[in-house]
Each structure stands twice: as C-alpha cells, then as structure tokens.
Image (tube, rainbow, N blue to C red):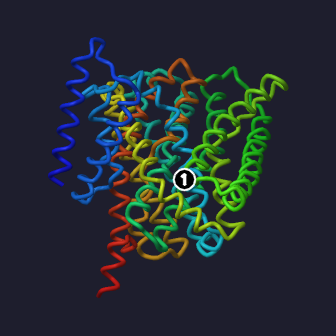
Amino acid sequence: MRYKIIIILILIFAMFFIINSNSNKKISPTLMIGFMLLASYIIGDFFETLKLPKITGYIISGLLFGPYILKFYSVETVKGLSFLNSMALAFIAFNAGAELRKKDLIKNIRVITFLTIGVTVFVYLGVTLSIYFLSEIIPFMKFLPISAKIGVASIFGVISVARSPSSTIAIINETGAKGSYTNAILSSTIVTDVLIIILFAITISTGEILIKSSKSFNPQFIFYLVVEILLAFFIGFVLGYFILFLMNMVKVEFSILIIALGFFVIKFSHFLGNYIVETYEISLNLEPLLICMAAGFTVQNFSKQGEIFLKRMEKVSIPIFLTFFSITGASINLNTLAQGWFIGVIAFLSRILTIYAGSFISGKMAGAIESITKWGWMGFITQAGVSLGLLSEVLRRFPEFGTKIQTILIATITINQIVGPILLKYGLTLSKETRNERSVSKKS
C-alpha cells in the first residue's frame, strides 16, 4: 500500500506542476481522465483496506480533485465528460437486467413484491409528510397555498423513492455477494428503478395541477407513459437477441460490443423521441436504461449465455465503475450542498427512517428471512443517476422554484450516495453472503 501512496503523491505533485505551468490553468480532458482513473483506483484500494467500499473511494477521489476542492479540473471539463457517464449507465443497466433471473424472481416473488411496494409507500408518504410539515421553515414554500405545498412535498417524496442500481451492483461485484439477502436487495432495487419512472410521471403531472391551479388533468399522459414503457421493453427484447447473435456468430470483442451498443441505444432513444415529437407532435420519451435492462434480462433468461454474459460484464466492470463514480464525485457541487444542507439532512433522516420501517414491516408481512427484516434497509439507501435525472425534469417543469427543490435534494442525494454503499457493504457482511464471509463459514 505504501508504494501506492507514493504513486498518488507523485501524481498529485505532477498535476500541480502541469496546472501551475499552464497559463490558463486548464488541462486536457485526456490527461484528466488518465489522472482520474489512476487516482481513483489507488484511493479505492486504500478505502478497501479500511473495510469501506471501493466506490466510496472513487466518489471521494472525484470530489477531492474536482472543481470545488483541489480544482484539478473545471466544471466545464467535468460536464464535457457527461457522455462517459451516460455510456457507463447503459453498461450498468445491461448488467442490472442480466442479474434478474426468472427462477430467483419466481422463488422470491412474495418477498420482492412486499419489499418493493412496502418501502415505496413508506418512503413516498413519509418524506412527503415531513416536507409538508416543515414547509413553514422552507423559504420558497412558506407562502404557497396548501395545495401547492402538497404538490411540492410530493416531488420530494417521489424522488426519495429512487435508488441506485449502479451502486448496488458495484458493491455486490466488489464483495462477491451471493444469497437470498443479495437477491432480494438487488431485485427490489431494479424493480423500483422501473416503478419510479411510472410513479414520477404520475406525481409530476398531479403536482402541476396542484401547483399551477390553471392546469387541468390530461389522461393522455398515462396512455403515452404505458406506450413508452412497453416500447422500451420490446426494443430491449430485440436488442437482447441481437447481442446474442453478435456474441455467438460474429465473435465481436465483448467490451467494444457493450460500450458501442450502450452509446447507440442512448443516441437512438433521443433521436426517435425527437423524431416523433417533430413529425407527429406526440411527446414520447423512450428511456434508454429500460431498453438496456430489458436486453440484459433477455440474454440472461431466454438463452444459455446468461452466466457467460455476466462474467464478461464483470471482467470489464472496473474501468466502467471507476469512470462513473469518479465523475459522479467530481460533479458534486459543494456550493449547492452548502445551501441546502439543513433541509437536505432532514430529508435524509426522514428517508432512512421510513426505509427502515418499510423494509422491516413488509419483510415481516412477506415472511422473509431474518437477515432481510433486520438489515434489508441497509441495501436501499444509495441514490445516484436516476434521482439526478428526475431532478432535471423537475427543473424543466417548474422553472420558478425547480432550482430550490434541486438544491435541497442534491444535498440529500449526496449524503445517500456516500453513506449508502457503506451501509450496503455492512448489510451484506452481516448477512454472511460476501465472498469472505462464505469462505469463513466453509472453513468453520
């Protein structure tokens, strides 16, 4: 480890020298990526020696060297790398879909259903009520009418429901966790990722009616939402068979195949959505992550290549996770965090308490094993890309106070993203399903 510490110190010194010898104090994106990957990898290893998740190290590394602390790279440079984050999310969505096995879903359907619905209801109602009752101390909500306060509070509630499949998969891969606890946490997290898209669409449309009293309910949005989801699943099903064809017949290099397809799905989804709007004046937004999840699910459950697909994904996952979580850390705006920290902390505490209550009660009702009822809540704390994506839509729909909602929720999401992976790793350890815990059990 001491050699790695020496290397990171040399890298930091070299970066200081390059930046200070450069007249405009800027570095190229290529140099930034190289430094980011090396620094995050070493810091991730250091966090592992402290028995903390590597991805927490990646996030802290991105934050430390990002635009708000050591300022090795600017906000503009980080934004310019957002396409890498999009491709990483597509990769993670392929992986998430492939982790859902029909036999496990059928075997644990009762537990997964109760956990998903129970935690969703508790968190949604709990955070909504918390924000509503705190509205008198939230400046932009203080003078709103009661209906508007309910609408704004429900937006906080629905975004609090969102989780992070990317963090969950990264921790499971890192720890080599397997078992009932792992399956329940991962399956519920992925199903919630699909459910949140529907719940958010309903909440944001209802919120517009409550906040902007002049607006009326348009039932067409439900029809378009169902079409969007079904179309995404259908395209993902076709894409899954296309991946199988390329794996079996064309023998394409796997890492190139997945990255290229992820990039294509993102661009195709945006192109098709824009084309339908411009040609038919119909607002139809395909969700690329749903397409990738459906493709991964198809490969896993409708072929004999599922486990091979997952093993190949795992082999190329380290640079993907490094890139994604490092850029996530570098994207954390400390100025925004400072502005919204107080209400953000309250929202975080409200969320964590309702997750605990929801997972405990629904786990008991489903007859889940003890590890799920006692420690299941630890697996549901993480938040990341999906939540931030939903926030951008809130900003678009409510320009008058969307920024203020965003400021508070970014503070909450940041805390969840740092604390969540640590709790998940601890929960997996307590359930004795990590690679290390299983090997200890075998020896004893």
How packed mark 1 is, by other alpha carbons closer than 10 Å (few <14, some 14-19, many 20 or more), is many
Depth check, front residue: 285 or 170 = 170
Kindly indicate the quadrant of the structure image that contains residue 37.
top left
Q: Position of residue 99 (x, y in %)?
A: 57, 63
Kindly indicate the quadrant of the structure image that contains residue 263.
top right
Q: Position of residue 251 (x, y in %)?
A: 65, 57
- Left or right of 39, for residue 398: right
Where 354 sits versus 436, above or below? Answer: above
Depth check, front residue: 165 or 216 = 165
Where 254 sits versus 272, above or below? Answer: below
Q: Residue at x 32, y 55 (%)?
A: 53
Amino acid type at image mark 1: Thr
- Left or right of 352, for residue 23: left
Most distant residue in the top direction? 23
Kindly indicate the quadrant of the structure image that contains residue 356.
bottom left
Element class at badge 1: helix
Q: Position of residue 202 (x, y in %)?
A: 66, 39
Q: Residue at x 44, y 22 (%)?
A: 140
How many marks overall?
A: 1
Depth check, front residue: 425 or 268 = 268
**Which quarter of the rendered picture does the C terminus lie within?**
bottom left
Q: Which residue is mark 1?
A: 120
- Left or right of 345, for residue 301: right
Most distant residue in the bottom direction? 444
**Which quarter of the rendered picture does the N terminus lie within?**
bottom left
Q: Position of residue 48 (x, y in %)?
A: 27, 57
